[in-house]
Amino acid sequence: MPSPQMASVTRQLSRRSVFEALLHRSPISRADLAKVTGLSKQTMSEVIDAFEQQGLVHRVGRTSGNVGRTAVLYELSAEGGHVLGIDLGARRLTVALADIAGRVLAEADEPTDSRGGAWVLDQIARLSDRLARENHTHPSRIRSIVLATPGVVNPKSGAIEMAPNITGLGHLNVVGLLGEKLGSPVVFENDINLALLGEIWHGCAQNVANVAFLALGSGVGLGLYVNGQLVRGENGAAGEIGYLPIGGDPLQAESRLQGCLEYQVGAAGVVRRYREAGGSDVDSARQVFERAQTGDSSAMNVVDETARLIGLAAATVIATVDPQLLVLGGSVGARPDFADKVARALLQLAPRQVEIRTSALGTRAGVVGALSVALRRLHDEFFGVAELAATLPLPPPRAA
Amino acid sequence: MTRDTACCFAADLGGTKLAAAMADAHGRIVAELTEPTDPRGGAYVAEQIAACADKLARAAGIEVTRPRHVMVGVPGAIDPRTGRVSQIPNIAGFEEFDVLGYLRGRFGPDVSIENDVNLAMLGEQAFGCASGCHNAAFLALGTGAGLGLLINDKLFRGASGAAGEIADLPFARDPTSQNQSTFELEVGSLAIVDRYRRQGGSGAVTVRDIFRLLEQGDEVAASVLDTTARWVALAVVTLQSLLDLELIVFGGSIGVRPELYERVRLVLPALFSRPITIAPSRLGDRAGLIGAAWAAAQALRQNPERA
């Protein structure tokens, strides 16, 4: 006779495997669930009945076309729980809502409040609340929230460090304050790490075990995914490639503070270098890129040099971590014309050639990645089994 | 000594010497030997490795026809899918030769080959200065440059086994110019000696000579090491920005010299705003062999039915 503890673990495992089958194969009948999970029909009935009572599953119809009796089909119910993904960028704030089955229900975005700090936190709360209400989801049903943010979150204080592009966040306990405003614990992850996870879940890096994601936009950063795990480093600062000693004098004060590479290739660096080259009347890197396309030779030189420096950074990544796939992302990095230039530079610079793709999700990558982590956390909360280290595999992309 | 106290065979293959050891199930070395690497390379070297196992067993007076695990460190990249070795300039004919196949034919299926610097990293983690580290690197500087990476507590080999091949790390000679160099072209032993000559020094044929001249107050030697240390520091900053490590262990015949790593340590704060910890290898030139023995014992543990 199994001990009560043993029986409890067995029950947890049964619930988990039924949930996993529903996640990947809905709509599905009890008989097929039993076949897939290997559980007895009686156990299956117990689990499904419990799931129905909890509002985790509902009936969506009956099988048809088979000989004999038709069977009831089940699928995961959106009422089972919701998750929220937030991507806080220097220029744009994006929020997305998904249900427990991984269906993305809605997304909204607006320019980040330029006043920074507490204003930004209020803005996040307002946009999240609006999104939930517009989708008839009471905010209390949101069980898991993940925020993508530039920089590094200090694991001890909860403050965001090394995020020079958003003012006034450095001194706030963002984790705590946002959690209070949204009424549910908030988990942070670096925006580039999350953009990488977004590409792995829904984008151009599905089913690839070793991926490097190099993002260039306002700033520059790198996400590394190795054997199913993000590489975060000892203090969460892995991938802060703005500090690579590339493109300038690493002993210069700007290099040490802002990062040698970022000082050159970040949006501010692109504008500065264009002005230094005699270009005038621009206030954004986007304008420099637009002028390069219309034949402005100073702009073209700045863009070419930016691509060469990103190529050098990518070659450094390839020499050091040997990825299977290099994804170029970010508002600048994912531009096809820019990515082509980087790929050409890499032909000269890289020690070996690696497949390069541009981000498939573009500006959505971060928020999709945030949803994927929020979803995993929700699944773990409901169906995590302490004896199993592995988390449930996420469902494939699907429409709501 | 019994069969049980000597159940693992470990070897660390270098361009000039081959070290081999028998170890117990905890990866502790119980007997070891070193001999010059067979210059004919290829199959001769593979045979030499296998012969070391016999010699060690005979010297210890035990019959070890089949060690329960064999771990061989090689100075090259190993493709994780095929087991083939590449980027191994110091051993002739090793890229074409199926060394893993040969050793398995000789010892049975429980044979692994691993990059030598990766094994040095494991050695330092198990018994050396990286004890308790989860994210660390072993930077080997000698004839060439190599890197062993420990990420999330595991060896980090890369998609094609070429992670840490930092000899190829691209560097700009002058950061503002497009004149590209690589790490090894700046800090390999040939580059250091060449730099000494170009700066007008005389009397140095090897890096060891330069260290000797430094002790005698040779200013060119000091300047050459300053320049070399600056390049090494740039590589250290590169690693730290990419991987945010707890510790970077300096090893290899040049890397362990305090004249070098103390210079690197001095330059780092000006190059990077957060602290970077570097330390010399505690196991020295035995790090690879000690790591190989430990890794063999670990492999045994993961294969308990064979243990």
Image: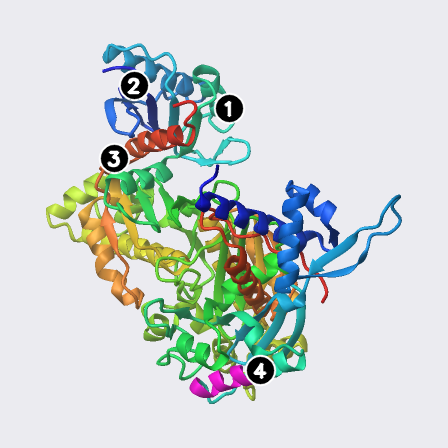
Q: Amino acid at mark 1?
A: Asp
Cα separation, mark 1 vs mark 2, equals 30 Å
Q: Position of residue B152 (x, y in %)?
A: 40, 50
Element on which disc 1 rests: loop
Q: Residues within 10 Å of mark 4 (few under 14, many from 20)?
A: some
Residue indicated by mark 3: B285
Give the number of the mark in front: 3 or 2. Answer: 2
Question: Which residue is farthest left?
Answer: B216
Question: Pointer 4: what residue?
Answer: A129
Q: Is residue A187 left or right of residue B234?
A: right
Relative placement, left or right, of A106 versus B170 is: right
Asked if marks 3 and 4 fall on the same chain, the answer is no
**Mark 2, residue position:** B4
* Residue A301 in view of the camera: no
Quadrant of the drawing holding the C terminus of chain A:
bottom right
Q: Of residues B235 and B185, which is closer to you in this image?
A: B235
- Label 2 in the same subunit as label 4: no
Q: Is residue B79 visible?
A: yes
Position above or below: A299 against B202? below
Q: Amino acid under label 3?
A: Asp
SS for dot 4: helix
Which amino acid, mark 2? Asp
Quadrant of the image occupied by residue B60: top left
Label 3, label 2: how many angstroms apart (C-alpha)? Answer: 27 Å
Magenta stretch? A117-126
Q: CA distance from mark 4 to mark 1?
A: 62 Å
Chain letter for the residue marked with disc 4 in the picture: A
User: What is the secondary structure assignment of the residue under circle 3?
Assistant: helix
For the residue pair B239 and A151, the one nearer the viewer reads as A151
Q: Which residue is mark 1?
A: B98
Q: CA distance from mark 2 to mark 4?
A: 66 Å
**x 57%, y 80%: residue:** A128
